[in-house]
Image (spheres, rainbow, N blue to C red):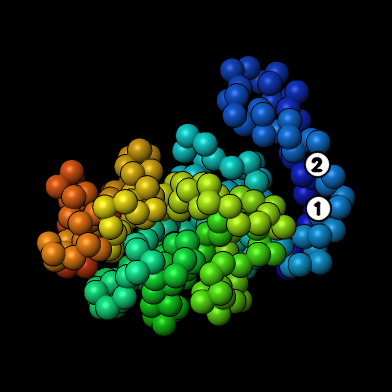
Amino acid sequence: MKELKYSFAHITAKEYKNLGDPNETLYKKLRIAEQLDTDKILDGLNKNGISFITINDPEYPSLLKETYDPPYLLYYKGDISLLKKQSFAIVGSRKAATYTKAALKQIIPYLKDYCIISGLAYGADDIAHRIAIDNNIPTIGVLGFGHNTHYPKTTEQTRNIIEEKYLTISEFPPNSQIERWKFVSRNRLIAGIAVGTLVTEAEIKSGSLITLEMAMDENRHTFCLPGNMTSQLSIGTNLRIQEGSIPVVFPEDITTILNESKII
């Protein structure tokens, strides 16, 4: 792990406000950051192999910086350079299994020019990470808690592989515990970093559909797998296709759109 050489904030709240027309949310975050016991935090990060970047660092994802509410700090384990590579998000139901796995085995190899980003949840997230790993495609896991916590137990092995070879990130300090609202906050990072988001399967009320809506709000490409009309896991995705998300019948339905709008 590289040495932690940065100050916790590259600019004070007062300096930021004096720049003129400050973002009020970012200003408040800077005020909070100045009240932290930074020596204690940095010591804890070093002991646990965790590093961090701020919104002012060159490694900070440019697309995330453009979103409505970018986090000032990102904690991470692994290869931070992956944040400079374009990412594609894949999310879906925790109940997803056979259909999601079969579809992603066809789709993910076509996305070799991207990082596959997801939330390390059970089901579709874990399937997406695993298939990416099996195809030697970089993958980023976004945590909805601090790095010293893990949930669910079933994805711990996947996370260990990702942190060894690729990257996990979180906006929450390492000892932050599990709370429901944090998973919604995590979803905004997934949507904000990725150039596009695919939902494989989703019930009519699903956290993965929140990620899709966040991606739409940030003017990103949104894709859904069409599914059996009798399946509860396809109702959410079929409805989003009706509302304008791109149906994915072939892997090229994704890659063609991404290639046409690729950021150089």
Residue drawn at x 35%, y 63% as measured from the top left: 93
**Which element is circle 1 on?**
helix
Disc 1 crowd, CA 10 A, few/some/many (<14, 14-19, 20+) = few
* Visible residue check, residue 174: yes
Q: Residue at x 47, y 34 (%)?
A: 68
What residue occupies the far right of the structure in this picture? 39
Query: Residue 87 falls in which quadrant of the image?
Result: bottom left
- Quadrant, the N terminus: bottom right
Determine whether 263 is above or below 224 in the image. Answer: above
Q: Nearer the viewer, residue 90 or 2?
A: 90
Considering only order in the chain, which callout, 2 or 1, is on the residue closer to the N terminus?
A: 2
Question: How far apart are the two marked residues, 1 and 2, measured between alpha carbons?
Answer: 8 Å
- Local SS, label 2: loop
Labels 1 & 2 near each other (Cβ < 8 A)? yes
| Image side of residue 174 versus residue 242, left or right | right
Q: Amino acid at mark 2?
A: Leu
Q: Which residue is mark 2?
A: 36
Q: Which mark is residue 29?
A: none
Whether residue 52 appears in this view of the structure is no
Residue toward you, 91 or 196:
91
Q: Answer with left or right where residue 150 lies relative to residue 173.
A: left
Q: Give how far across and how far down residue 148 sits, in percent.
A: 69, 64
Whole-percent x and y of residue 6? 77, 49
Q: Mark 1 highlights which residue?
A: 41
| Amino acid type shown at disc 1 | Ile
